[in-house]
Image: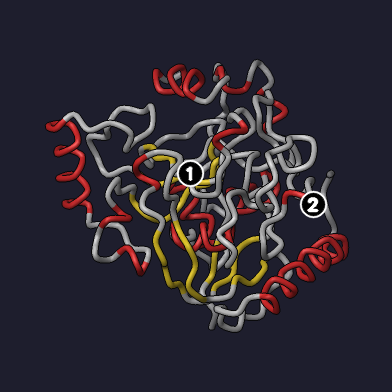
Amino acid sequence: MSGFEAEFAKQTDVHARDSSTRLRSRVLGAALVAALGVLASGSAESAPAAPADMLPVPGGTFTMGAEDEGEQDERPAHSVTVAAFLLDVDEVTNEKYAACVKAGKCRAPDSLAGSKLTHGMPAVFKKPDHPVVGVSWSDARAYCEFRGKRLPREAEWERAARGDDGRRYVWGNDAPDPKRHGVFGGQATTRPVHGYPDGRGPYGHFDLAGNVWEWIEDEYDPYAYRRETAGRGMPGSCAEILETQNELRRTGKQGFTGTNPIPVECEHVLRGGAYNYRASGIRASNRVHHPGSFRIAVAGFRCAKSPG
């Protein structure tokens, strides 16, 4: 087990195979939620048509970040405009990822042997319908490319999680309930994807809150929301990010990188929370970051796609 895993375990408080017919029937209900969300949205562009395993997210302007809660890197709340895109209904499962490994386009996930984050049950994390974990940022990127997709940008992910109403949580503003909303709140393992309909996002996506943290395309920028590019959802360059991190160290500023040390490299964003994460931190605006090389039991991903 890496030294990081021991530290991460402290910091985070510690379905069987579907046929294509069943998958389509599952997605129909989620698609209805997405359609209703689009109809109710006054600021949204038309959403693109989606394949069976994805749902559309309409383009538009939404509120990203938070004004008076969370860490300093979540502030200020600000308006961001994104184009319409498609996002996987579910987190990528072990079964789906295995197809990429078999095709020789992805490397196998980490075995998780000895990881304290599995609580002695690594076999549970490897079940076919559980989200794949033990994959790095580059592993996630390779899989999405194998499927003709890509990783979502951070602004896209938050757009899919918050819609047009600025909700605090993926499902709305009700307090988090692990029995209704998702796999979080100090649970010991992941669970099958697509299991909490009450926890769906505004456009019908499952598990945007909990089960596993999701790798994001963007590099983590503590000052992303303060830059001139914030309205387009764009972080600074790696050089600007490194300069910011050096400034945070030099001036002793706190609260920009959570309880994690200030990075010394350009790390990548993860979003959404995981099975072991505290319920109070499952806000849709919460930002986490780790080196892209990490292959840990709490990190997986889902893919996005631009229309056309």
Above or below, 79 against 209 in this view is below
Q: Quadrant of residue 68?
A: top left
Secondary structure type for disc 1: loop
Q: Callout 2 environment at 10 Å: few (<14), some (14 to 19), or many (20+)?
A: some
* 174 left or right, relative to 86: right
Relative image position of residue 174 (x, y in whole percent):
70, 45
Whole-number angstrom distance, CA of label 2 to CA of label 1: 22 Å
Q: Position of residue 193 (x, y in %)?
A: 73, 46
Q: Amino acid at mark 2?
A: Pro
Position of residue 286 measured from the top left corner of the image (x, y, whole percent): 48, 44
Residue positioned 37% across, 49% down in the render: 75
Q: Amino acid at mark 1?
A: Asn
Name the image quarter holding residue 230.
Answer: bottom left
Q: How many marks?
A: 2
Can you see residue 92?
no
| Residue 10, numbered circle | none
Q: Mark 2 — residue? A: 197
Q: Residue at x 60, y 39 (%)?
A: 212
Q: Callout 1 environment at 10 Å: few (<14), some (14 to 19), or many (20+)? A: many
Please give left or right for residue 2 compared with residue 55 in the image. Answer: left
Kind of element beneath mark 2: helix
Tell me, for residue 286, which label it has, or none: 1
For residue 307, say whether it is visible: yes
Please determine whether, in this image, residue 13 is positioned above or below residue 83. above
